[in-house]
Amino acid sequence: MALHSNSSLKKIVIFASGTGTNTENIIKYFKDSSLARVVAVFSNRKSAKVLKKAHDLEVKALYFDREALYSSNEVLHVLEDIKPDLIVLAGFLWVFPDSILKKFPKKVINIHPALLPNYGGKGMFGVKVHEAVINNKDIESGISIHYVNERYDEGEIIFQTKIKVDEDETPDSLAGKIHQLEYKHFPEVIEQLLQQNRT
């Protein structure tokens, strides 16, 4: 009965490499939604806390290695079986393979903890981004949610929002502000994208 009642729900798949705070937030946001569910969480790190968080929240948790993503197309085949309506990168640190992007056009999105095109690119993630913002004496920062293409952080921007960087800001305090923006806006943007594509 549960399977039948959920058959009309949109399917979200999340890729993450770390602790999974955004992943946990998104899973909980859609837990009782009439629109969508997070159906699987993929991680390229076997020890990533995100896998345990997904498991604890009764979402399928899958680990894969570099070969499964880039060489054997194993991850692609699993995704083809799942048929996700949206693939969400939430702190996923590898460049996403072209084979998956071609199979799921305009269905892969990412969040970045800065106002792109500033502070994007390979190696720019987490605290490194916030250090760069502060060292550059920027007066504002924010988040960018964008479609993923074959280059780090260069896909079409879907949504941005800003916050003020205080004079006495530290990378940790800025990270805290950015996390709050992520927790508020990321699930909402995912929801809006899925509503736009509702059939």
Image (cartoon, helix red, strand yellow):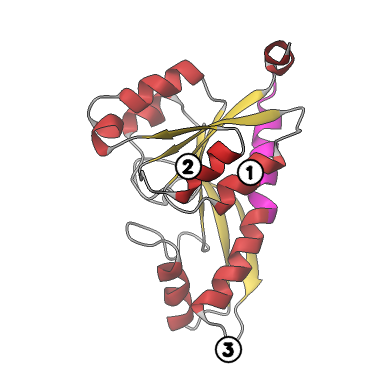
* CB atoms of marks 2 and 1 within 8 Å: no
Q: Residue at x 65, y 70 (%)?
A: 163
Q: In this view of the protein, which residue sits in the foreground, 63 or 115?
A: 63
On the rendered image, what quadrant is the C terminus found in?
Answer: top right
Q: Residue at x 68, y 22 (%)?
A: 9
Q: Where residue 194 sits in the image (x, y, percent)? A: 66, 31
Highlighted magenta segment, given as a residue range: 184-199
Q: Residues within 10 Å of mark 2 (few under 14, many from 20)?
A: many
193 falls in the magenta region: yes
Tell me the element at label 2.
Answer: helix
Q: Is residue 181 visible?
A: yes
User: Mark 3 sits on what residue?
Assistant: 168
Distance from the alpha carbon under mark 1 to that under mark 3: 31 Å
On the rendered image, what quadrant is the N terminus found in?
Answer: top right
Q: Nearer the viewer, mark 2 or mark 1?
A: 2
Q: Amino acid at mark 2?
A: Leu
Numbered label attached to residue 26: 1
Q: Of callouts 2 and 3, which one flags the residue occurring earlier in the amino acid sequence? A: 2
Q: In this view of the protein, which residue sits in the foreground, 39 or 154?
A: 39
Q: Of callouts 1 and 3, which one flags the residue occurring earlier in the amino acid sequence? A: 1
Q: Amino acid at mark 1?
A: Ile
The answer to which image quadrant residue 76 occupies is top left
Question: In the image, is 58 to the left or to the right of 116?
Answer: right
Q: Where residue 180 sits in the image (x, y, percent)? A: 66, 62
- Image: 21 above or below 41: below
User: Mark 2 sits on what residue?
Assistant: 51
* CB atoms of marks 2 and 3 within 8 Å: no
Distance from the alpha carbon under mark 2 to that under mark 1: 14 Å
